[in-house]
Amino acid sequence: MNYHLFRTINDWSGNSGLDDLMKFAAKDLLFLVFAGFALLCGQRLRDKDYRPVALAFGGLVLTFAFAQIAAKVHTEARPFVTHPSAHTLISHAKDQSFPSDHATAAFGIALAVALFLSVRWGALMFVLGLWIGVARIYVGVHYPGDIAGALLVAALGVAVMAVIGRFLPDLAAGPAPKAMAGR
């Protein structure tokens, strides 16, 4: 099923306009996700609201740690290595495919933003993460299972941080929430 879904998505390639858009998403869209994350964190830090930023970063650290473990547990060659007939639109090393690093980063940021910084911005970043994941399949460098694995790893990392965050003291409390500011 993983290969059949890969073939279905990868076989959509061949339209130069769509190919260019998907190559952009597969390679460069992640930079915009990182920039959005940095801006949101910068805004919170400017307001001296440190806790959500620390939790978001902690979620990302755990996400990347879990991704490293997942890569060691489940080794998988890239689709263009296993299936030379795959349409490969970007160059890539013949290294580990599972989980997708790009999708792991995009989903990890999206989920951390949604849980700790801003639900609206997190939802937008999640859509961008889906686009990045589909694009990585489209350009021939990942299987759908690599993207699903990235989402699972990101959800686990951010969820564990959310649980840990419940037990951490709020040592550097920022300003009072706006609803409580006048009391």
Image (cartoon, grey):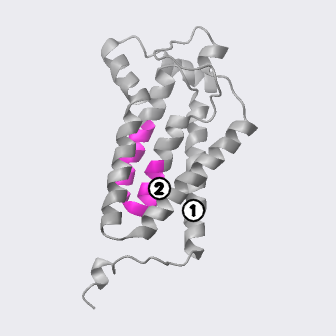
- Kindly indicate whether the residue at mark 2 contacts the one at mark 1 (C-beta within 8 angstroms): yes
Q: Quadrant of residue 44?
A: bottom left
- Within the magenta stretch, is there residue 110? yes
> Percent from the top left, x then y, of residue 66?
65, 48
Residue 158 appears anywhere in the view: yes
Q: Main secondary structure of the magenta part?
A: helix
Query: Dot 1 corresponds to which residue?
Result: 161
- Quadrant location of the N terminus in the rendered image: top right
In the image, is residue 167 above or below residue 67?
below
- Disc 1 crowd rating (10 Å Cα; few below 14, some 14-19, many 20+) is many
Q: Quadrant of residue 30?
A: top left
Numbered circle sitting on residue 111: none
- Quadrant location of the C terminus in the rendered image: bottom left
Q: Secondary structure at mark 2?
A: helix
* Residues in magenta, as a range: 109-130
Q: Residue furthest right?
A: 73
In the image, is residue 86 above or below residue 99?
above
Which residue appears at 34% of the width and 48% of the height? 36
Numbered circle sitting on residue 112: 2
Q: Residue furthest left?
A: 182
Q: What's under tag 1, amino acid-wise?
A: Met
Which residue appears at 41% of the width and 34% of the height? 131
* Cα separation between marks 1 and 2: 9 Å
In this view, the residue in front, 14 or 51, is: 51
Residue 1 appears anywhere in the view: no
In this view, the residue in front, 158 or 3, is: 158
- Disc 2 crowd rating (10 Å Cα; few below 14, some 14-19, many 20+) is many
> Percent from the top left, x then y, of residue 6?
56, 22
- Within the magenta stretch, is there residue 123? yes
> Percent from the top left, x then y, of residue 168?
57, 74
